[in-house]
Image (cartoon, grey):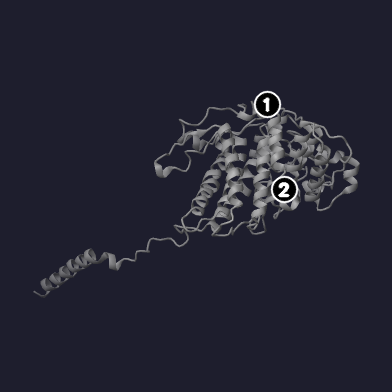
Amino acid sequence: MKKNRNITYKGLVLILSVFVLTISCEKWNDSDINIDPDKPADVSMSLILPGVQQSMGFNLVGNNTVRTNNIWMQIFEGVDRQSYTEGRYQITAADTGNSFEPMYTEMMMNLGIIIDKANDEGVESPHFEGVAEVLMATTLGIGTDLFGDMPYTEAFKGGELIFSPAYDTQESLYGTINTLLDQAVSNLNSATNVIDVEGDVIYDGDIDLWKKAAYSIKARHAIQLSAKNGNAAYTAALAAVSNGFTSNDDDMLVPWEAANGNPIYQFMEERTDIRMGAYLIDLLLATDDPRLPFYAEEDGDGNYSGSALRGQDANASYPGPNIAAIDASTKLMTYSELKFIEAEARLVLGQAGAQEAYEAAVAASVLRVTGDANTAWLDANINGDPVTMEKLMTQKYIDGAATNQPYADYRRTGFPNLTLASDAVISEIPVRFPYPQSELDYNTQNVPSVTLLTKLWWDQ
Protein backbone atom coordinates (compact mmCIF):
# COMPACT_ATOMS: atom_id res chain seq x y z
CA MET A 1 0.00 0.00 0.00
CA LYS A 2 2.89 2.34 0.83
CA LYS A 3 4.42 1.49 -2.48
CA ASN A 4 1.24 2.40 -4.33
CA ARG A 5 0.97 5.69 -2.45
CA ASN A 6 4.52 6.58 -3.50
CA ILE A 7 3.67 5.88 -7.10
CA THR A 8 0.59 8.07 -6.78
CA TYR A 9 2.59 10.93 -5.30
CA LYS A 10 5.20 10.65 -8.04
CA GLY A 11 2.53 10.68 -10.70
CA LEU A 12 0.86 13.67 -9.13
CA VAL A 13 4.15 15.59 -9.00
CA LEU A 14 4.79 14.82 -12.68
CA ILE A 15 1.32 15.99 -13.68
CA LEU A 16 1.62 19.19 -11.65
CA SER A 17 5.06 19.88 -13.14
CA VAL A 18 3.78 19.58 -16.68
CA PHE A 19 0.74 21.71 -15.81
CA VAL A 20 2.78 24.47 -14.22
CA LEU A 21 5.33 24.39 -17.06
CA THR A 22 2.53 24.68 -19.59
CA ILE A 23 0.78 27.65 -18.03
CA SER A 24 3.85 29.47 -16.76
CA CYS A 25 6.52 29.04 -19.43
CA GLU A 26 6.58 32.74 -20.23
CA LYS A 27 7.34 33.52 -16.58
CA TRP A 28 9.90 30.76 -16.16
CA ASN A 29 11.86 31.40 -19.41
CA ASP A 30 14.14 34.40 -19.76
CA SER A 31 13.18 36.12 -23.03
CA ASP A 32 16.86 36.96 -23.60
CA ILE A 33 18.14 33.42 -23.09
CA ASN A 34 18.80 32.79 -26.81
CA ILE A 35 20.39 36.17 -27.58
CA ASP A 36 24.11 35.93 -28.31
CA PRO A 37 25.80 39.01 -26.80
CA ASP A 38 28.62 38.62 -29.31
CA LYS A 39 26.18 38.88 -32.24
CA PRO A 40 24.01 41.94 -31.59
CA ALA A 41 20.89 42.36 -33.70
CA ASP A 42 21.53 46.08 -34.18
CA VAL A 43 24.94 47.69 -34.63
CA SER A 44 25.76 51.39 -34.81
CA MET A 45 27.12 52.98 -37.97
CA SER A 46 30.39 53.77 -36.17
CA LEU A 47 30.94 50.05 -35.52
CA ILE A 48 30.01 48.92 -39.04
CA LEU A 49 32.21 51.44 -40.86
CA PRO A 50 35.71 50.31 -39.79
CA GLY A 51 34.90 46.68 -40.63
CA VAL A 52 33.91 47.73 -44.15
CA GLN A 53 37.06 49.80 -44.59
CA GLN A 54 39.31 47.01 -43.34
CA SER A 55 37.64 44.53 -45.70
CA MET A 56 38.18 46.92 -48.60
CA GLY A 57 41.82 47.32 -47.61
CA PHE A 58 42.33 43.58 -47.39
CA ASN A 59 40.12 42.01 -50.05
CA LEU A 60 39.71 44.81 -52.59
CA VAL A 61 43.15 46.45 -52.73
CA GLY A 62 45.26 44.25 -50.49
CA ASN A 63 45.68 40.62 -51.42
CA ASN A 64 43.14 38.62 -53.36
CA THR A 65 42.69 40.90 -56.38
CA VAL A 66 45.98 42.80 -56.34
CA ARG A 67 48.27 39.81 -55.97
CA THR A 68 46.81 38.10 -59.05
CA ASN A 69 46.69 41.03 -61.44
CA ASN A 70 50.09 42.31 -60.29
CA ILE A 71 51.50 38.93 -61.34
CA TRP A 72 49.90 39.44 -64.75
CA MET A 73 51.32 42.98 -64.83
CA GLN A 74 54.79 41.59 -63.97
CA ILE A 75 55.06 43.72 -60.85
CA PHE A 76 55.12 40.45 -58.92
CA GLU A 77 56.23 37.06 -60.22
CA GLY A 78 54.60 33.87 -59.03
CA VAL A 79 57.35 31.41 -58.14
CA ASP A 80 55.41 28.58 -56.49
CA ARG A 81 52.04 26.88 -56.06
CA GLN A 82 48.91 28.87 -56.97
CA SER A 83 50.84 32.07 -57.75
CA TYR A 84 53.04 30.24 -60.25
CA THR A 85 49.94 28.80 -61.91
CA GLU A 86 48.34 32.26 -62.12
CA GLY A 87 51.46 33.47 -63.89
CA ARG A 88 50.48 31.42 -66.93
CA TYR A 89 46.98 32.92 -66.66
CA GLN A 90 45.43 29.74 -65.34
CA ILE A 91 42.65 31.08 -63.16
CA THR A 92 39.14 29.66 -62.86
CA ALA A 93 35.83 30.28 -61.12
CA ALA A 94 37.16 28.33 -58.15
CA ASP A 95 39.85 30.99 -57.60
CA THR A 96 37.84 34.23 -57.46
CA GLY A 97 35.30 33.73 -54.70
CA ASN A 98 37.55 35.49 -52.17
CA SER A 99 37.65 38.50 -54.49
CA PHE A 100 34.00 38.69 -55.56
CA GLU A 101 32.02 37.58 -52.53
CA PRO A 102 33.41 39.96 -49.87
CA MET A 103 32.40 42.91 -52.04
CA TYR A 104 28.82 41.90 -51.33
CA THR A 105 28.87 40.24 -47.91
CA GLU A 106 31.42 42.49 -46.19
CA MET A 107 31.41 45.75 -48.13
CA MET A 108 28.35 46.76 -50.13
CA MET A 109 25.74 45.03 -47.95
CA ASN A 110 27.06 46.75 -44.84
CA LEU A 111 27.39 50.07 -46.63
CA GLY A 112 23.72 49.74 -47.57
CA ILE A 113 22.91 49.26 -43.89
CA ILE A 114 24.80 52.44 -43.04
CA ILE A 115 22.92 54.36 -45.74
CA ASP A 116 19.59 53.10 -44.37
CA LYS A 117 20.53 53.97 -40.79
CA ALA A 118 21.69 57.42 -41.84
CA ASN A 119 18.18 58.07 -43.13
CA ASP A 120 16.30 56.92 -40.01
CA GLU A 121 13.75 59.48 -38.94
CA GLY A 122 15.01 61.77 -36.23
CA VAL A 123 18.68 60.82 -36.64
CA GLU A 124 19.24 61.80 -40.27
CA SER A 125 23.01 61.81 -40.81
CA PRO A 126 23.87 62.78 -44.39
CA HIS A 127 27.59 62.94 -43.58
CA PHE A 128 27.61 59.25 -42.67
CA GLU A 129 25.54 58.52 -45.76
CA GLY A 130 27.98 60.45 -47.94
CA VAL A 131 30.95 58.50 -46.60
CA ALA A 132 29.14 55.23 -47.27
CA GLU A 133 28.31 56.36 -50.80
CA VAL A 134 31.96 57.18 -51.56
CA LEU A 135 32.98 53.73 -50.33
CA MET A 136 30.13 52.07 -52.25
CA ALA A 137 31.22 53.79 -55.47
CA THR A 138 34.87 52.86 -54.82
CA THR A 139 33.98 49.21 -54.27
CA LEU A 140 31.66 49.03 -57.24
CA GLY A 141 34.20 50.80 -59.45
CA ILE A 142 37.09 48.47 -58.68
CA GLY A 143 34.75 45.48 -58.81
CA THR A 144 33.32 46.23 -62.24
CA ASP A 145 36.78 47.06 -63.61
CA LEU A 146 37.78 43.50 -62.68
CA PHE A 147 34.59 41.54 -63.41
CA GLY A 148 32.50 43.67 -65.79
CA ASP A 149 28.73 43.27 -65.34
CA MET A 150 27.72 42.70 -61.71
CA PRO A 151 24.53 42.42 -59.64
CA TYR A 152 23.62 45.72 -58.02
CA THR A 153 20.05 46.92 -58.61
CA GLU A 154 18.58 43.58 -57.46
CA ALA A 155 21.36 42.73 -54.99
CA PHE A 156 20.64 42.66 -51.23
CA LYS A 157 16.93 41.99 -51.81
CA GLY A 158 16.60 38.61 -50.17
CA GLY A 159 13.87 40.11 -47.98
CA GLU A 160 11.90 40.65 -51.20
CA LEU A 161 12.56 37.01 -52.15
CA ILE A 162 15.05 37.96 -54.88
CA PHE A 163 17.66 35.25 -54.45
CA SER A 164 19.01 35.28 -58.00
CA PRO A 165 19.71 38.94 -58.79
CA ALA A 166 20.05 40.11 -62.36
CA TYR A 167 23.37 41.51 -63.51
CA ASP A 168 23.60 45.23 -64.22
CA THR A 169 25.63 46.06 -67.33
CA GLN A 170 28.97 47.73 -66.80
CA GLU A 171 27.67 50.75 -68.68
CA SER A 172 24.83 51.15 -66.19
CA LEU A 173 27.17 50.49 -63.27
CA TYR A 174 29.36 53.38 -64.39
CA GLY A 175 26.27 55.55 -64.31
CA THR A 176 25.54 54.28 -60.80
CA ILE A 177 29.10 55.07 -59.69
CA ASN A 178 28.76 58.67 -60.85
CA THR A 179 25.32 59.02 -59.25
CA LEU A 180 26.62 57.68 -55.94
CA LEU A 181 29.53 60.12 -55.98
CA ASP A 182 27.30 63.08 -56.85
CA GLN A 183 24.94 62.12 -54.03
CA ALA A 184 27.91 61.73 -51.70
CA VAL A 185 29.15 65.26 -52.38
CA SER A 186 25.65 66.63 -51.81
CA ASN A 187 25.30 64.74 -48.54
CA LEU A 188 28.77 65.68 -47.34
CA ASN A 189 27.92 69.33 -48.01
CA SER A 190 24.78 69.14 -45.86
CA ALA A 191 24.62 71.76 -43.12
CA THR A 192 22.40 69.57 -40.92
CA ASN A 193 23.69 66.29 -39.55
CA VAL A 194 22.69 64.44 -36.37
CA ILE A 195 25.38 61.76 -35.90
CA ASP A 196 28.98 62.71 -36.62
CA VAL A 197 31.12 60.24 -38.57
CA GLU A 198 33.02 58.07 -36.10
CA GLY A 199 34.92 54.81 -36.42
CA ASP A 200 36.50 56.04 -39.65
CA VAL A 201 40.01 54.53 -39.96
CA ILE A 202 40.74 56.33 -43.24
CA TYR A 203 40.04 60.01 -42.57
CA ASP A 204 38.96 60.05 -38.93
CA GLY A 205 35.66 61.65 -39.85
CA ASP A 206 37.15 64.58 -41.82
CA ILE A 207 34.29 65.47 -44.17
CA ASP A 208 36.39 67.77 -46.36
CA LEU A 209 38.75 64.89 -47.15
CA TRP A 210 35.83 62.63 -48.00
CA LYS A 211 34.59 65.23 -50.50
CA LYS A 212 38.04 65.30 -52.11
CA ALA A 213 37.98 61.50 -52.23
CA ALA A 214 34.61 61.55 -54.00
CA TYR A 215 35.91 63.83 -56.74
CA SER A 216 39.17 61.88 -57.06
CA ILE A 217 37.35 58.56 -57.54
CA LYS A 218 35.11 60.33 -60.04
CA ALA A 219 38.19 61.39 -62.03
CA ARG A 220 39.53 57.81 -62.02
CA HIS A 221 36.39 56.42 -63.62
CA ALA A 222 35.93 59.34 -66.00
CA ILE A 223 39.32 58.71 -67.62
CA GLN A 224 38.72 54.95 -67.62
CA LEU A 225 36.10 55.66 -70.30
CA SER A 226 38.59 57.33 -72.64
CA ALA A 227 38.12 54.62 -75.29
CA LYS A 228 34.35 55.07 -75.10
CA ASN A 229 33.94 58.82 -74.64
CA GLY A 230 37.08 60.25 -76.23
CA ASN A 231 37.81 63.86 -75.34
CA ALA A 232 34.66 64.08 -73.24
CA ALA A 233 36.21 61.55 -70.85
CA TYR A 234 39.29 63.72 -70.41
CA THR A 235 37.21 66.86 -69.94
CA ALA A 236 35.11 65.16 -67.29
CA ALA A 237 38.24 63.89 -65.56
CA LEU A 238 39.73 67.39 -65.40
CA ALA A 239 36.52 68.80 -63.94
CA ALA A 240 36.71 66.27 -61.14
CA VAL A 241 40.46 66.74 -60.62
CA SER A 242 39.92 70.41 -59.81
CA ASN A 243 38.01 69.41 -56.65
CA GLY A 244 40.08 66.36 -55.74
CA PHE A 245 43.19 65.67 -53.67
CA THR A 246 45.75 68.46 -53.33
CA SER A 247 48.64 66.67 -51.62
CA ASN A 248 49.80 63.29 -50.32
CA ASP A 249 48.15 64.16 -47.03
CA ASP A 250 44.80 63.55 -48.73
CA ASP A 251 45.56 59.96 -49.81
CA MET A 252 42.77 57.44 -49.27
CA LEU A 253 44.65 54.75 -47.36
CA VAL A 254 43.62 51.81 -45.18
CA PRO A 255 46.04 51.47 -42.23
CA TRP A 256 47.46 48.26 -40.80
CA GLU A 257 49.31 47.47 -37.59
CA ALA A 258 51.15 44.68 -35.79
CA ALA A 259 47.94 43.18 -34.42
CA ASN A 260 46.24 43.34 -37.83
CA GLY A 261 48.95 43.18 -40.44
CA ASN A 262 49.15 44.29 -44.05
CA PRO A 263 47.62 41.67 -46.41
CA ILE A 264 50.74 41.06 -48.52
CA TYR A 265 52.78 40.81 -45.32
CA GLN A 266 50.36 38.15 -44.09
CA PHE A 267 50.52 36.31 -47.41
CA MET A 268 54.32 36.28 -47.40
CA GLU A 269 54.36 35.07 -43.81
CA GLU A 270 52.08 32.17 -44.71
CA ARG A 271 52.94 31.31 -48.33
CA THR A 272 55.97 33.17 -49.79
CA ASP A 273 54.69 32.32 -53.29
CA ILE A 274 55.67 35.62 -54.92
CA ARG A 275 58.80 37.66 -55.61
CA MET A 276 59.21 41.00 -57.29
CA GLY A 277 58.98 40.79 -61.07
CA ALA A 278 62.01 41.52 -63.24
CA TYR A 279 60.08 43.95 -65.46
CA LEU A 280 59.39 46.40 -62.61
CA ILE A 281 62.75 45.93 -60.90
CA ASP A 282 64.67 46.51 -64.16
CA LEU A 283 62.74 49.75 -64.73
CA LEU A 284 63.76 50.96 -61.28
CA LEU A 285 67.38 49.83 -61.66
CA ALA A 286 67.72 51.57 -65.03
CA THR A 287 67.50 55.02 -63.42
CA ASP A 288 68.65 54.19 -59.89
CA ASP A 289 65.09 55.01 -58.82
CA PRO A 290 64.96 55.93 -55.10
CA ARG A 291 61.77 53.91 -54.70
CA LEU A 292 63.63 50.65 -55.35
CA PRO A 293 64.60 49.75 -51.75
CA PHE A 294 61.05 50.53 -50.64
CA TYR A 295 59.46 48.33 -53.28
CA ALA A 296 61.90 45.43 -52.91
CA GLU A 297 64.06 43.80 -50.28
CA GLU A 298 67.67 42.90 -50.98
CA ASP A 299 68.11 39.41 -52.36
CA GLY A 300 70.50 36.83 -50.88
CA ASP A 301 73.46 38.50 -52.64
CA GLY A 302 72.68 41.92 -51.23
CA ASN A 303 71.29 43.21 -54.53
CA TYR A 304 67.84 44.06 -55.82
CA SER A 305 66.63 41.57 -58.39
CA GLY A 306 63.40 40.49 -59.96
CA SER A 307 62.38 37.03 -61.05
CA ALA A 308 62.33 36.87 -64.84
CA LEU A 309 58.97 36.14 -66.43
CA ARG A 310 58.25 32.47 -65.67
CA GLY A 311 61.78 32.20 -64.27
CA GLN A 312 60.58 30.80 -60.92
CA ASP A 313 63.55 32.47 -59.20
CA ALA A 314 62.98 31.99 -55.48
CA ASN A 315 66.20 33.92 -54.77
CA ALA A 316 64.83 37.15 -56.25
CA SER A 317 63.82 40.06 -54.05
CA TYR A 318 60.82 39.79 -51.76
CA PRO A 319 58.28 42.65 -51.79
CA GLY A 320 59.72 45.59 -49.86
CA PRO A 321 58.45 47.61 -46.91
CA ASN A 322 56.23 49.99 -48.89
CA ILE A 323 54.29 46.99 -50.17
CA ALA A 324 54.63 44.32 -47.52
CA ALA A 325 55.69 45.79 -44.16
CA ILE A 326 53.36 44.66 -41.40
CA ASP A 327 52.09 48.24 -41.01
CA ALA A 328 52.18 49.29 -44.69
CA SER A 329 48.91 50.94 -45.67
CA THR A 330 46.94 49.71 -48.66
CA LYS A 331 45.90 52.32 -51.21
CA LEU A 332 42.33 52.98 -52.35
CA MET A 333 43.23 56.25 -54.15
CA THR A 334 46.20 58.60 -54.04
CA TYR A 335 47.13 62.17 -54.92
CA SER A 336 49.85 60.90 -57.27
CA GLU A 337 47.29 58.86 -59.22
CA LEU A 338 45.10 61.95 -59.53
CA LYS A 339 47.99 64.02 -60.88
CA PHE A 340 48.75 61.32 -63.45
CA ILE A 341 45.10 61.50 -64.51
CA GLU A 342 45.39 65.27 -64.87
CA ALA A 343 48.63 64.96 -66.85
CA GLU A 344 47.11 62.43 -69.26
CA ALA A 345 43.96 64.49 -69.79
CA ARG A 346 45.91 67.68 -70.49
CA LEU A 347 48.35 65.84 -72.75
CA VAL A 348 45.62 64.27 -74.90
CA LEU A 349 43.56 67.47 -75.04
CA GLY A 350 46.65 69.50 -75.95
CA GLN A 351 46.23 71.74 -72.93
CA ALA A 352 48.95 73.58 -71.07
CA GLY A 353 50.04 72.08 -67.78
CA ALA A 354 50.54 68.45 -68.84
CA GLN A 355 54.28 68.57 -68.13
CA GLU A 356 53.78 70.23 -64.76
CA ALA A 357 51.11 67.72 -63.71
CA TYR A 358 53.34 64.82 -64.80
CA GLU A 359 56.30 66.12 -62.84
CA ALA A 360 54.10 66.73 -59.80
CA ALA A 361 52.72 63.17 -60.05
CA VAL A 362 56.15 61.55 -60.03
CA ALA A 363 57.35 63.86 -57.26
CA ALA A 364 54.34 62.97 -55.13
CA SER A 365 54.92 59.27 -55.71
CA VAL A 366 58.61 59.47 -54.80
CA LEU A 367 57.85 61.50 -51.67
CA ARG A 368 55.07 59.18 -50.52
CA VAL A 369 57.10 56.01 -51.04
CA THR A 370 60.49 57.19 -49.76
CA GLY A 371 59.61 59.97 -47.34
CA ASP A 372 62.11 62.25 -49.10
CA ALA A 373 61.75 64.71 -52.00
CA ASN A 374 64.77 63.29 -53.92
CA THR A 375 64.99 66.52 -55.92
CA ALA A 376 68.29 65.66 -57.55
CA TRP A 377 66.93 62.40 -58.95
CA LEU A 378 63.80 64.14 -60.23
CA ASP A 379 65.88 66.82 -61.94
CA ALA A 380 68.06 64.19 -63.59
CA ASN A 381 65.30 61.86 -64.75
CA ILE A 382 61.89 63.53 -64.81
CA ASN A 383 61.86 67.31 -64.65
CA GLY A 384 62.18 68.97 -68.04
CA ASP A 385 62.06 65.68 -69.95
CA PRO A 386 59.14 66.19 -72.36
CA VAL A 387 56.24 63.99 -71.35
CA THR A 388 54.80 61.40 -73.74
CA MET A 389 51.98 58.97 -73.18
CA GLU A 390 54.42 56.08 -72.82
CA LYS A 391 56.57 57.89 -70.25
CA LEU A 392 53.49 58.98 -68.33
CA MET A 393 51.94 55.52 -68.22
CA THR A 394 55.27 53.91 -67.32
CA GLN A 395 55.64 56.19 -64.33
CA LYS A 396 51.99 55.64 -63.38
CA TYR A 397 52.63 51.89 -63.56
CA ILE A 398 55.58 52.24 -61.17
CA ASP A 399 53.54 54.42 -58.84
CA GLY A 400 50.63 51.95 -58.84
CA ALA A 401 52.62 48.90 -57.71
CA ALA A 402 50.50 46.72 -55.40
CA THR A 403 47.23 48.34 -56.50
CA ASN A 404 44.64 47.40 -59.14
CA GLN A 405 45.31 50.49 -61.24
CA PRO A 406 48.17 49.23 -63.47
CA TYR A 407 45.87 46.43 -64.64
CA ALA A 408 43.04 48.87 -65.41
CA ASP A 409 45.38 51.24 -67.27
CA TYR A 410 47.10 48.44 -69.20
CA ARG A 411 43.82 47.26 -70.67
CA ARG A 412 42.81 50.83 -71.50
CA THR A 413 46.08 52.11 -73.00
CA GLY A 414 48.29 49.11 -73.81
CA PHE A 415 51.08 50.47 -71.61
CA PRO A 416 53.45 49.18 -70.46
CA ASN A 417 54.35 46.89 -73.36
CA LEU A 418 54.40 43.53 -71.57
CA THR A 419 55.51 40.16 -72.94
CA LEU A 420 53.15 37.19 -72.88
CA ALA A 421 54.23 34.36 -70.58
CA SER A 422 56.03 31.63 -72.54
CA ASP A 423 53.78 28.89 -71.14
CA ALA A 424 50.55 30.88 -71.33
CA VAL A 425 47.40 28.78 -71.48
CA ILE A 426 45.62 31.51 -73.47
CA SER A 427 46.71 33.71 -76.35
CA GLU A 428 46.79 37.04 -74.50
CA ILE A 429 47.14 38.46 -70.99
CA PRO A 430 43.67 38.14 -69.39
CA VAL A 431 41.41 41.15 -69.77
CA ARG A 432 39.09 40.29 -66.89
CA PHE A 433 38.56 38.07 -63.84
CA PRO A 434 36.20 35.07 -64.16
CA TYR A 435 32.98 35.02 -62.15
CA PRO A 436 33.19 32.87 -59.01
CA GLN A 437 31.84 29.36 -58.69
CA SER A 438 29.22 30.48 -56.17
CA GLU A 439 27.59 32.63 -58.85
CA LEU A 440 27.75 29.85 -61.42
CA ASP A 441 26.12 27.47 -58.93
CA TYR A 442 23.45 29.68 -57.36
CA ASN A 443 22.77 32.43 -59.90
CA THR A 444 23.25 30.33 -63.02
CA GLN A 445 20.56 31.92 -65.17
CA ASN A 446 21.98 35.44 -64.76
CA VAL A 447 25.77 35.03 -64.90
CA PRO A 448 27.16 36.30 -68.22
CA SER A 449 29.00 33.71 -70.29
CA VAL A 450 32.58 34.98 -70.52
CA THR A 451 36.17 33.83 -70.86
CA LEU A 452 39.35 35.50 -69.64
CA LEU A 453 39.60 37.16 -73.05
CA THR A 454 36.06 38.59 -73.14
CA LYS A 455 36.63 42.35 -73.06
CA LEU A 456 34.79 44.61 -70.66
CA TRP A 457 32.36 47.20 -72.01
CA TRP A 458 34.79 50.11 -71.66
CA ASP A 459 37.50 48.06 -73.40
CA GLN A 460 35.53 47.41 -76.60
* Residue at which label 1 appears: 428
Gap in angstroms between the C-alphas marked 2 and 1: 36 Å
Can you give x and y, in whole percent of width and height, for residue 45 in the image?
53, 56
Q: State the quadrant of the C terminus.
A: top right
Q: Residue furthest top?
A: 427
Residue situated in front as seen by the camera: 50 or 302: 50
Residue mark closest to the camera, 2 vs 1: 2
Q: State the quadrant of the N terminus.
A: bottom left
Residue at position x 65%, y 35% from top? 86
Can you give x and y, in whole percent of width and height, for residue 241 in the image?
71, 42
Can you give x and y, in whole percent of width and height, for residue 225 in the image?
66, 32
434 w.r.t. 374: above or below: above
As helix, strand or loop, the secondary structure at mark 2 comes to loop
Q: Residue 80 falls in which quadrant of the image?
A: top right
Residue at position x 82%, y 32% from top? 388
Residue at position x 28%, y 68% from top? 27
As helix, strand or loop, the secondary structure at mark 1 comes to loop
Q: Residue furthest left?
A: 1
- Nearest to N terminus: mark 2 or mark 1: 2
Is residue 282 in view?
no
365 w.r.t. 33: above or below: above
Residue situated in front as seen by the camera: 108 or 125: 125
Q: Residue 413 falls in which quadrant of the image?
A: top right
Can you give x and y, in whole percent of width and height, for residue 82 in the image?
63, 38
Mark 1 is on which residue type? Glu
Residue 178 circle label: none
Q: Residue furthest bottom?
A: 2
* Residue at which label 2 appears: 245
Left or right of residue 33, residue 182 in this image: right
Left or right of residue 419, residue 186 in this image: left
Mark 2 is on which residue type? Phe
